[in-house]
Image (cartoon, helix red, strand yellow):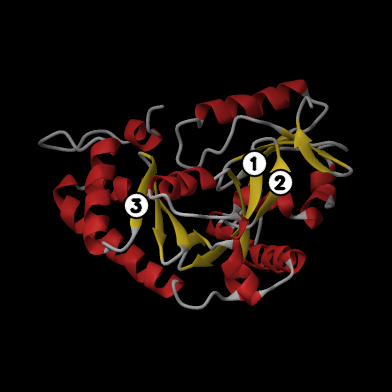
Amino acid sequence: MASSFGKVFGAGKGDAPLTPTAFRERYQAALERAAPQAEVTVASDEELTVSSCGLGFSIYLGNAYREYIGDPGLLDEIIGRHVDAFCNAMTTAEAALSPDNLVLVIRPAIETTMLAAKAAKKEAFGPDDLPMRRPFAGSLYVYVAERRDASLRFPPTETIRKVISDPEEVMTRALQNTKLIQGEIEVRGGEGDLALLTCEESLGGSLALTDELWALPQMRAFGDQPVIGLMRNLTIVANGANAEAINSVRQFLDNCSGDVNYLTDELFVRRSDGWAVLGN
């Protein structure tokens, strides 16, 4: 799958800029030099996963690549600055986990690269070594993440339980924090058929978890069973009775399939007992 930010931004003056793959390789090499104790795994050209001191982190390279495309001559400076910022955040994150920083994010299964790395090193692991999660619908899960300095890490379940022992209390606290961070919700378009929902701090994909939102008259206008498509930073909603609007959501996700914020092409319908994959 081609990289979205590789397609969107054109070449600068002089030599052709690095491809997303080459940029990721340079970034990874710099990170491994700066943090030799960390285990860095490639999730995609746009994402690296890092394990350090029993903690898991995700690094999304889109912003750094955009900066680089804007001025290719500053490659080393841009990578160095982003790597330094991540290492500082990682050092802070390795301190005691704070319940006030827990949030809920919706993702496909993120454990694959973690398990592969542990298996390659023949390390033993169990459920408590993996991030805390619960099913959302289809291929997606709701993960408990810790947010610091606008970055996310996914602490092992064991680490979270040392702070809050009851998993239900963890979910409740993290949802409360998520709502506070999301702040004001922006609704663009619609009039009951199609709308784009975004919020602060790129947590727009977690709006599906905010029950109060879907009880508002503005959202009720999308019918008793609204249909949504999810990305990391936004939610797109269609009236569940409008086939044309639903098809527009499908097309939107298809057009975004190479974007760093892309999650899945599945659509979800809201029912009395929660979200389900449309058509199931």
* Residue 190 at x, y percent in the picture: 71, 37
Q: Is residue 270 above or below residue 267?
A: below
Query: Which label's residue is closer to the chain start, 2 or 1?
Result: 2
Q: Nearer the viewer, residue 119 or 147?
A: 119
Quote the CA–CA distance across marks 3 and 2. 27 Å
Name the amino acid, label 2.
Pro
Horizontally, is 152 left or right of 131 in the view? left
Q: Quadrant of residue 9?
A: top left
Q: Nearer the viewer, mark 1 or mark 3?
A: 3
* Residue 183 at x, y percent in the picture: 64, 63
Q: Nearer the viewer, residue 56 or 228?
A: 56
Label annotation for residue 140: 1
Where, quadrant-wise, is the C terminus in this rendering?
A: top right
Q: Quadrant of residue 102?
A: bottom right
The residue carrying mark 2 is 135
Label annotation for residue 40: 3
* Residue 263 at x, y percent in the picture: 56, 38
Residue 265 visible in image: yes
Q: Are marks 1 and 3 in contact (CB under 8 Å)?
A: no
Query: Which label's residue is closer to the chain start, 1 or 3?
Result: 3
Label annotation for residue 259: none
Residue at image position (26%, 61%) is: 36
Helix, strand or loop at label 2? It is strand
Q: Nearer the viewer, residue 34 or 222?
A: 34
* Residue 40 at x, y percent in the picture: 34, 52
Helix, strand or loop at label 1? It is strand
Q: Nearer the viewer, residue 10 or 24?
A: 24
Residue at image position (69%, 35%) is: 138
Q: Are marks 2 and 1 in contact (CB under 8 Å)?
A: yes
Q: Are marks 3 and 2 in contact (CB under 8 Å)?
A: no
Q: Is residue 172 above or below residue 253?
A: below
Quote the CA–CA distance across marks 1 and 3. 24 Å
